[in-house]
């Protein structure tokens, strides 16, 4: 009986265009957009050139300072500042006509860079121009010291090298935020229509009373509806992961380099799928509660909206936490543990103790929520009105 009711409810759910749209197409479009956005962000503007407005009277010597920077394109203008304001260039460089002469004579010289710090491209250009001018400054300083017979080691007693723990730290960092965020949102949004229809929808259409008059136990009826919501969530999560995997492997370079798990690849894939199922079951329980409490589909949707919004907050807390800073609480708190666990997995770390804490905590809280929903469903006050 349970299986028959479950299959019927599942079939009815996928007849709904909203469910099909939010289960399949929404993850496809959301994941595609964010994957390509983050790929472009990680690439750091490789292969792009930025227009730097300079005065038409700029000297050849000054132009040669930027000759080694392929991403800086000098655009001559009678009014460099105006060129930036009108969008002809991303930044401008204003230099006095006697700049090179002042350098040669050892007198003070000044360069002014004009740009928009709120624009990513303009900031990139100003940083690149500053690097070029800094390199030129060091070259001038070195020549002056050589001319005076001074050892260059005096002004540079040591060098500083900064390295990341992983060569692809930036890419992995973005993925560790991207994957659980979209997975959580997709499952939450994908299960919402089915959850609302299966309980609140029945009450709104006045068909719940007829269902309760059948010889089927309320517990069986509730369990079949809960399994339907969980199944929709699992399918949504799997579609999301498949889309992510295909697009990263086929359409990206930097993100693809970051996702290299070596010998742990099959373990990580299997654990990711297991986490998706556990999270979908957890969200299904929450969505079921909101639908039981709601008298109409619209009201149930209003109750479930905060659940989907909650998915974004854990990412903010986990963003600035290093892999070696993760503690028990990061894996014991639902939703937060999804971000924490994927952060480890995407770093190639498989910690079975953390996995057990994550799955165990989600299942325990899911059972508690399910029992609360069962108590509510057994009372006519919540299912008949």
Image (cartoon, rainbow, N blue to C red):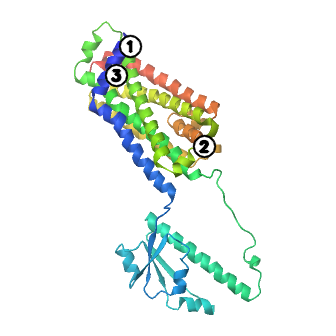
The secondary element bearing badge 2 is classed as: loop
- Note whether 206 is above or below 183 in the view shown: above
Task: Point out the tag, 3 or 1, that comes first from the N-terminus.
Answer: 1
Q: Do callouts 3 and 1 mark residues in contact (Cβ within 8 Å)? A: no
The secondary element bearing badge 1 is classed as: helix
For the view shown, which residue lies furthest in the left direction?
Answer: 205
Please name the residue that numbered disc 2 is placed on.
347
Cα distance between the residues tagged 3 and 2: 36 Å
Which of 203 and 90 lies nearest the eye of the viewer?
A: 90
Please name the residue that numbered disc 3 is placed on.
10
Which of 373 and 139 lies nearest the eye of the viewer?
A: 139
Q: Which residue appears at 52% of the width and 46% of the height? A: 175
**Residue 199 seen in the figure:** no
Q: Which residue appears at 37% of the width and 31% of the height? A: 191
- Note whether 272 is above or below 95 in the view shown: above
Q: Do callouts 3 and 2 mark residues in contact (Cβ within 8 Å)? A: no
**Residue 22 in the image: x percent, y percent?**
34, 36
Task: Point out the tag, 1 or 2, that comes first from the N-terminus.
Answer: 1
Cα distance between the residues tagged 1 and 2: 40 Å
Q: Which quarter of the rendered picture does the C terminus lie within?
A: top left
- Mark 3 is surrounded, within 10 Å at the Cα level, by few (under 14), some (14 to 19) or many (20 or more) other residues, namely some
**Residue 126 in the image: x percent, y percent?**
50, 71
Cα distance between the residues tagged 3 and 1: 10 Å
Which of 265 and 274 lies nearest the eye of the viewer?
A: 265
- Mark 2 is surrounded, within 10 Å at the Cα level, by few (under 14), some (14 to 19) or many (20 or more) other residues, namely many
**Residue 155 in the image: x percent, y percent?**
72, 77
Please name the residue that numbered disc 1 is placed on.
3
Q: Which residue appears at 31% of the width and 16% of the height? A: 380
Q: Which quarter of the rendered picture does the N terminus lie within?
A: top left
């Amino acid at each position: 009986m349970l299986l028959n009711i479950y299959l019927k409810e599942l079939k009815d759910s996928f007849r709904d265009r909203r469910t099909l749209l939010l289960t399949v197409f929404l993850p496809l479009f959301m994941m595609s957009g964010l994957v390509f956005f983050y790929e472009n962000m990680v690439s750091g503007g490789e292969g792009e050139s930025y227009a730097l407005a300079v005065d038409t009277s700029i000297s050849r010597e000054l132009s040669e300072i930027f000759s080694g920077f392929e991403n800086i394109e000098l655009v001559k203008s009678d009014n460099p500042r105006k060129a930036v304001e009108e969008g002809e260039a991303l930044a401008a460089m204003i230099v006095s006509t006697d700049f090179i002469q002042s350098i040669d004579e050892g007198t003070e010289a000044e360069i002014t860079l004009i740009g928009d710090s709120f624009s990513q491209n303009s900031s990139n250009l100003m940083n690149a121009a500053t690097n070029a001018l800094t390199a030129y400054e060091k070259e001038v300083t070195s020549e002056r010291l050589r001319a005076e017979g001074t050892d260059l080691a005096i002004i540079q007693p040591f060098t500083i090298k900064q390295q990341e723990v992983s060569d692809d730290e930036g890419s992995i960092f973005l993925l560790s935020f991207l994957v659980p965020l979209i997975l959580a949102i997709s499952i939450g949004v994908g299960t919402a229509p089915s959850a609302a229809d299966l309980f609140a929808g029945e009450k709104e259409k006045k068909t719940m009373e007829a269902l309760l008059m059948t010889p089927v136990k309320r517990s069986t009826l509730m369990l079949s509806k809960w399994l339907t919501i969980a199944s929709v969530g699992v399918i949504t999560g799997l579609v999301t992961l498949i889309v992510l995997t295909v697009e990263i492997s086929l359409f990206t370079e930097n993100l693809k380099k970051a996702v290299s798990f070596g010998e742990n690849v099959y373990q990580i894939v299997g654990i990711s799928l297991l986490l998706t199922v556990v999270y979908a079951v957890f969200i299904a329980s929450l969505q079921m509660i909101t639908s039981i409490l709601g008298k109409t589909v619209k009201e149930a949707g209003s109750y479930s909206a905060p659940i989907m919004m909650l998915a974004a907050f854990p990412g903010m807390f986990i963003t600035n936490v290093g892999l070696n800073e993760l503690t028990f609480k990061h894996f014991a708190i639902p939703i937060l543990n999804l971000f924490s666990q994927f952060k480890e997995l995407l770093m190639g770390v498989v910690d079975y103790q953390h996995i057990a804490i994550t799955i165990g905590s989600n299942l325990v809280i899911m059972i508690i929520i399910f029992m609360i929903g069962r108590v509510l469903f057994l009372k006519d006050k919540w299912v008949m009105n």
